[in-house]
Amino acid sequence: MPRISLLVADDGGLDRRGEAVLMVLELLVRNHTRAVFIVCPAVLQIHWRDQMWDKFGLDFHVVDSALMKDLCRSRSIYVNHWSHFPRLITSIDFIKQEWPMCLLHDVLPAETTYPRK
């Protein structure tokens, strides 16, 4: 069975975080996903990371320019931070930048086309 790609979008004030976490947990428990990528406003990154650890024991890494610099120093200048950890959190503003977006495209699976019936 192919891996599942899932996008959960939260309009401001609707607080879908709990529902999103339950979906992520279900996919992880059933082994239907290996990677989880959360994109949120910058002010919520640490909150998401702390909540995922405190309530569910899931270790997420916040991807920002500081993490990029640390990985380049400790691993290699060619390391792709998007593929380095299985569970990531980043901000909307960070992911919109050219360099992070280029690196993200490098790790995303190629678009698959299915025959039409």
Image (cartoon, helix red, strand yellow):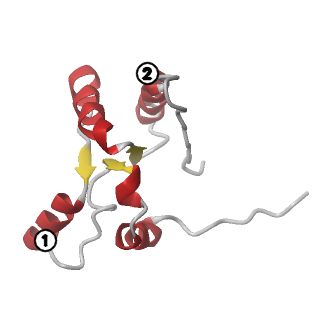
In the picture of the structure, the residue carrying the numbered disc 1 is: 75
Task: Give whichever of 68, 55 is nearer the camera.
Answer: 68
Callout 1: few (<14), some (14-19), or many (20+) C-alpha neighbours within 10 Å? few
Outermost residue toward the left in this view: 74
The numbered dot on residue 18 is 2
Mark 1 lies on a secondary structure that is: loop
The numbered dot on residue 60 is none
Residue 19 rendering spot, x and y as whole percentages: 49, 23
Relative vertical location of residue 10 with respect to residue 19 in this rendering, above or below: below
Type of amino acid under label 1: Arg
Mark 2 lies on a secondary structure that is: helix
Q: Is residue 96 left or right of residue 85?
A: right
Task: Give whichever of 67, 96 is nearer the camera.
Answer: 96
Residue 9 rendering spot, x and y as whole percentages: 55, 38
Q: Residue at x 41, y 51 (%)?
A: 92
Which of the two discs, 1 and 2, labels the residue nearer the N terminus?
Answer: 2
Task: Give whichever of 53, 3 is nearer the camera.
Answer: 53
Residue 90 rendering spot, x and y as whole percentages: 33, 50
- Label 1 to label 2, Cα distance in Å? 35 Å
Relative vertical location of residue 93 with respect to residue 45 in this rendering, above or below: below
Q: Is residue 27 visible?
A: yes
